[in-house]
Amino acid sequence: MAFEGLSDRLQETIKKIKGKGKVDEQDVKEMTREVRLALLEADVNFKVVKDFVKRVRERAVGQEVMESLTPGQQVIKVVKEELTDLMGGDESKIAVAKRPPTVIMMVGLQGAGKTTTTGKLANVLRKNHNRKPLLAAADVYRPAAIQQLETIGKQLTMPVHSEGTEADPVDIAKNAIEKAKEDNHDYVIVDTAGRLHVDGELMGELQRIKEAVNPDEIFLVVDAMTGQDAVNVAQSFDDQLDITGVLLTKLDGDTRGGAALSIKAVTGKPIKYAGMGEKLDQLEPFHPERMASRILGMGDMLTLIEKAQTQVDEKQAKELESKMRTASFTFEDFLDQMEQVKNMGPLDEIINMIPGANKMKGLKNASFDDKQIVHVEAIIQSMTKKERQDPSLMNASRKKRIAKGSGTSVSEINRLLKQFEEMKKMMKQMSNTKGKKGKGMNFPFM
Amino acid sequence: MSFFKKLKDRFVKGEEEQQESTSQNEPKNESLEEADSFNPYTGEAYKGGEVVYSKAEEEERLRKEALEAEGKSLDGETETYEDKLDRLSVPSEPTDEANIASKFKKGLEKTRTSFSTKINDLVAKYRTVDEDFFEELEEILISADVGVNTVMEMIDELEMEVKRRNIKDTSQVKEVISEKLVEIYYGNDEAEEVEGLNENPDGPTVYLFVGVNGVGKTTTIGKLAHRLKSEGKKVTLAAGDTFRAGAIEQLDAWGERAGVNVIKHSAGSDPAAVIYDGIQSAKSRNADVLICDTAGRLQNKVNLMNELSKVKRVIEREIPNAPHEVLLVLDATTGQNAMSQAKTFAEATDVSGIVLTKLDGTAKGGIVLAIRKELSIPVKLVGLGEKVTDLEPFDAHAFVYGLFADMVEEFDEDEEENQA
C-alpha cells in the first residue's frame, strides 16, 4: 500500500528530534508537513488541509507541543482532537415531520449509490424506527433505474411509487406524497437521478422537486472514494439545495475516505450514515471518531494514544529517576511531572510506572488525593523561576506573595516546602542506598 | 436480511433442481467445471438461470409479467432518454467512419495547439520561476488528484531542470513543464501515441469490463457498443452483472438503443455462465466484438475478485488470446484509491487498459498519471458526458492541459481584471 499512516510518517521526524531537549519552531514545521502529506494522501482536499494544518501548527507552536517532552505524540493528539472536532459528533438522527409523511430527498452524482442507499435507508427506517416508508422512483433518465428501485422494493417487500420514464420527476415526487397520505406511509424517500453539480438544467429540476414537495431532509449521497473534487460537489449541491445531511457510500472498501472531512469542512452538514456493504441491511450510523482514525491511517487511535502515553510515562519516569539520583530535582521538574500526571489519569497507576515505586512500602496501598494536585500546582506556578530552582530563597514576604497568587495559605506553602525538602532528602538516601529497600517516599500531594 | 434468507430458501430448492437437469445443460456445466458456482455476494450458490424459469411456475409467471412490463417501459424510455439527451446537449456526431477519424484528428490538433498557448499564458502570469510559482503548480496538480508523491517528484524534477538549464524567466520554463507532464504519463515510451483498443483479426474480439461499483461500466459498454456498431461492426453484449438490481435491464436498454444483441440470464445466476453463453453466441453469429459486463465490486472483497478471475479464465479457455482487452473503468472523481483499484484489479484480471469516466464534471482524474507510471496501464478511452457518442480515445496532451485549465482560467480572469 502506498499509504502510510500519520504515526508512521511522524516516526522519521521524531527520530531526528530525539535527543534534542525540546523542539523548536522548525521541528514543528516539519511535523506539520508530515501531517499535511498524510491528509493529502487520504484525499482530504488541499484547501481543507491547508486550514487544518494551520490550526494544528498554531496549537503546536503554542505550549502544548513545544513544551512537551514527547512532541510526536503530542502532535498526533492535537491532530486527532482537531480532526474529531471538525468531523462533529454522532448525528444519525433523521427528521420527523410534524404532519406525516416525512419527505426525504436523495441527491448526488452519478454512480454514488443513491438508489441502493434509498433502499438501505428505508430498511433502517422500518427496522430501527418502526416506520412505514414509501419509495419514489424519480430517476427517469438512467436506463433501468426505475426497475432497479422496483427490484429493491421487492427485495424489501416495500412499495415503490413509479410512473415510468416519461413522467416529470416533479410530478412523480408530488404524486408519491399523495399516495403516501392515502396509504398511511409515514416516510417518502425520493430517489432522484444522478447528475453533475455543474449541470444547471438538471440541478434546476432538483430545485423544482424541492419546492414542490418541501422535503424535511435532503441527503447528499457521496462515494467515500471521492478525491479532491468532493469539496466542489458538496459545496455546489449545498449552495443550490441547502442539503441537510450526507450519506457516505462504499465505506467498506479500502479507501481512507478523506472526502468525508472535506465535505464536513465546506458544508458543515453532518454525515449521518455510511454504507458498509452491498446488502440492503448494511447501512450504519456514521462514527466521526472512527473516521478520524481511518483518515489518519490508524486502526484505533485511542488505544494508540494510550500506548503512546504509556511510553511517555516510562521515558519521563526514567528522567525523573536520574534526577532523583543526582538530587537535582527542582520545583520546575516537579511541575513538569504534575502536568504529565494530570494528563495521565489515576495517580495510583502513574506511581506504578516509576521504576521501583511499587516496591516501596510507603507507596503501596497509598491513596492519593487528586484535588491536592491543583493546589500544589497553583503554588508552584506562583513562584518565580529562581524560587522554583532554589527553594532556600523562600522568606516570609515571598511566601505571602505566593499564597496570594495561588489562593492558598502560607501554612500550605510551608507544608509543601517541607515535604519537598523531605522528598529531596529521601531521594538522596534512595540513590545512596541504591537498590536497597527505600524508607518510604512522601510526595507532597499524598 | 429477510430477502437473503428467502433467496437462500429458494435457492436450496433451486440447486437440487439444477442437479436434476444437469444432463440438459451439459455444455454449460462443462464450461464451469472448475467452479463451485457460489455467489460470493451472498455466500450462497447461484440460482442457476434456466432452472428458475422452468420449475418455479409462480416465479415464471411473475417474471414474464415483469419482462412484459419492462419491455414496454424500455421502449418508452429509449425515446424519452434520447429526447432528453437532445435537450441536454450538442448536435450528434456524424456516424460514418471517415468522418469520425477526421474528427478525432482535428480534435487532437486543436487541443495540442491550445495546450501550448495555455501554457504560454500560464507562464506569463509569473514573471519569475520562484517558490510561489512552484507552490501554485503543486496545488493545482494535487487538486487534480495527481497524488502527493507524483506531484512532489515532478516538482523536484522541474526545479532541478530549471536549475540545470539556468532558467530564470517563466517564458522558458513552459517547454519543461509540458515535457515533464507528458513524460510522467508516457515514461520511457517515446512514441507518445494515442493507444487504441486491441482487436482480434480472426474474430470475435472480446472486451471484458471490470471496476468498482458505480463507475459507469454499463454506460460505457453502451457507448462503446454504439460506436463499434456505427463503425459497421457486429457487436454482442453479455450481461455479466447478475447481482445488482436492474443491471441486466440497464444493459438490455443500451443494447436496444445501439441495436446490438444482448445475451442475458436471470438475476442471481452465475456470471461466468452468462459470459460463456455470450462467447458461444458471438462465435455462432460470427460477431466481430463481444463486450462482457461484470458486476461492480470493491477491490478488497477477495471472493468477488476471485469470481472475476474465474470469468476471465472462462474467456481465455474458449477463445485463444482472449480477452483482447480487460478494461478497468475508473471514475474521474475517485481520489487516491484509484491506485489501489488498479493494482488489485490488475492482479486479478491482468487489466490492459483504463476507461476514465465522468470527465465532463469538475474532477480531473489525475491519478491516471501515477497509475500509468507505476503500473504501466494506459488510459484507452475517456467518457465525456451522458450522450451515447461521448466516448473518445485518450489523448495525453489534451488531458495534461485539462489538469491546468483552472490555473489558466484564473490567469485569464486576473488578466481581465487588470485590463479593466
Image: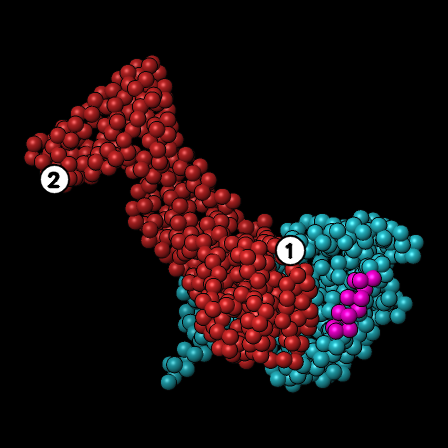
Label 2 chain ID: A
Q: Residue lying farthest left? A: A397
Q: Which quarter of the image is occupied by the C terminus of chain A?
A: top left
| Residue B189: mark in rendering | none
Label 1 chain ID: A
What segment carries the magenta color?
A: B57-70
Q: Colour of chain A?
A: red
| Residue A404: mark in rendering | 2
Residue B368: quadrant of the picture:
bottom right
Going by the numbered disc 2, the residue's amino acid type is Lys
**SS category of the residue bearing label 2:** helix
| Residue B63 locus on image (x, y percent) | 78, 66
Query: Badge 1 local density, few (<14 within 10 Å), some, or many (20+)?
Result: some
Colouring scheme, one of rainbow, by chain, secondary structure, one colour: by chain
Of tags 2 and 1, which is closer to the observer? 1
According to the image, label 1 marks what residue?
A279
- Asked if one can make out residue B320 in the rendered structure from this viewpoint, the answer is no
| Residue A130 locus on image (x, y percent) | 55, 57
| Residue B187 locus on image (x, y percent) | 63, 61
Which of A390 and B396 lies nearest the eye of the viewer?
A390
Image side of residue B198 versus residue B399, left or right: right
